[in-house]
Image (tube, rainbow, N blue to C red):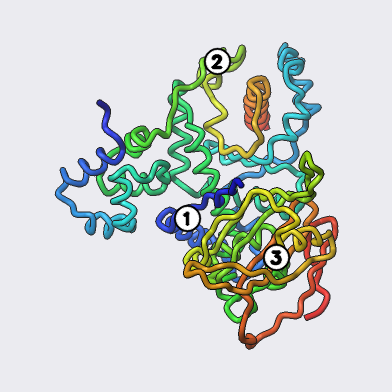
Amino acid sequence: MASTLGEELKRLRESRGMTLRQVEEESGISNGYITQLENDKIREPSPNILHKLSLVYKVPYEQLMKSAGYFVPARDKKMHSVGSKKEKERSLASYALSAAKLTEEEEEALIDYLRFLRFKKKKK
Amino acid sequence: MSYRRKVQTLLPDERRPIEERVKLLLKAAGVKGPPTPTQSIVDCAQMVHVGEIDLEDFKESLVQRGLRRLLELADVSQLWRKVKGFFRYDDRVFYVDPTLHPHQKNHHTFHEAYHAIDPAHEIVSEVIHLDTAQTLSPWAKRKMEREANLGASLIRFQVDQLQKEARDLPNSLETVCYFAEKFESSIHGALRHYVEYHGNVCVMLVFNPTADVTMSGEPYYTLRYYLPSPRFESCFESSWPERLYPDDKLFSIVNSALPNQPSCDEIVLADLSGNRVVCVAQGFHNHYDILILVFPKPSTQLRKRLLFRITTDRTNAPTKLAR
């Protein structure tokens, strides 16, 4: 069975021989919050907290994000008809975007427009 | 009776790194006091403004590239009405809807600036960019947006600057309006920061701007959300009904808060020990919502008095009448 984020954080801390107090001192995160994380009481951990803990435990931040459930499989969508492979693969989720809910078509048009803006900028 | 849940806020441990990061940004931008200079923040966050979106130019380019299909699929003009702003990490370009009210434009600029300065957000974006088999889960996206909203609010109100200035002022909606003007914010934004960060006992309630009617013809107001201050939560039970009916005294305060005509009355709340506490409830209609601030009736006069009457124009900007 896959371990939870809490189990993983506890294992990382204990394998490094660190106490909650030591992690608190190194990360600036209160031991109360760390305890809640280790007991899986905090279901939606902050990216900043995971980033700090990844630095203390010297593990990739991405690993902790995955354990916390930050990522889900992308929808199986048809790729765009133009642009380089890298450009085709660009998804809206890689932008910090404030928008109301978009339909798939709107999302596709928006990705194309953002690509268009980049193209225009390079041309200048 | 159904009860509205408290609006979700970040825990103190989750706020601390955001506060620290915003403090550094404000220092680098040379911010000395309110209001926060937007351009200095943009410069310090190393963001490049993309300017106006030229839809005609884009539509023409779609046609030229044989992508007429996209034009047919999505109404491009409608699409851009939905997008309030974005920030792209690789070339640090940002866009904010130019048709927004200046207060909202500033909020979205500060929101994108926070995304820009938070390495934890940037790495998430990189992972998504490189691995397209996965995307950000809805709760993680909400969490990051909540952090960027808090970051925007802290940039606007300069972390603890409002708290420092509010120390000698009365706990009231007039004080909130005074800060909204000083920090160039909406009254809604100022009230939220005031309740979240100021050490007073108070709660903010946000109702829909108009009353609805039940099947039997009884009017009611719908509570959109409420936010108690940390001290309010330690003194009072914090749950509010989703619908407010005429038999509740608060109804008349909400009902009489018309645009340009704030309302005020006393209500009685039971504290956690069961004691009845007389509270002041002040209402304000900003054209979009009805904002209510509730706080215990003060027993002593404060050293300073703020003579500041609340009015509003269509821009939601408070107007100073007398000081």
Residue type of the residue flagged with mark 2 = Lys
Helix, strand, or loop for circle 1?
A: helix
Residue ID for mark 3: B180
Figure check: B84 above or below A75: below
Question: Whole-percent x and y of residue A1?
Answer: 25, 26
Helix, strand, or loop for circle 3?
A: helix
Question: Whole-percent x and y of residue A59?
Answer: 27, 40
**What is the crowding at mark 2: few (fewer than 14 residues within 10 Å), some, or many (at least 20)?**
few
> Does B80 sit left or right of A47 as displayed?
right
What is the chain letter for disc 3? Answer: B
Residue ID for mark 2: A77
Q: Quadrant of the C terminus of chain A?
A: top right
Residue ID for mark 1: B18
Q: CA distance from mark 2 to mark 3?
A: 45 Å
Q: Residue furthest front?
A: B216
User: Residue shown at 77%/23% (left/top)?
Assistant: B75
What is the chain letter for disc 2? Answer: A
Q: Note whether residue B27 is visible.
A: no
Residue type of the residue flagged with mark 3 = Ala
User: Residue shown at 63%/74% (left/top)?
Assistant: B278
Figure check: A73 above or below B312: above
Question: Whole-percent x and y of residue A52?
Answer: 34, 49
Residue type of the residue flagged with mark 1 = Ile
Q: How many marks?
A: 3
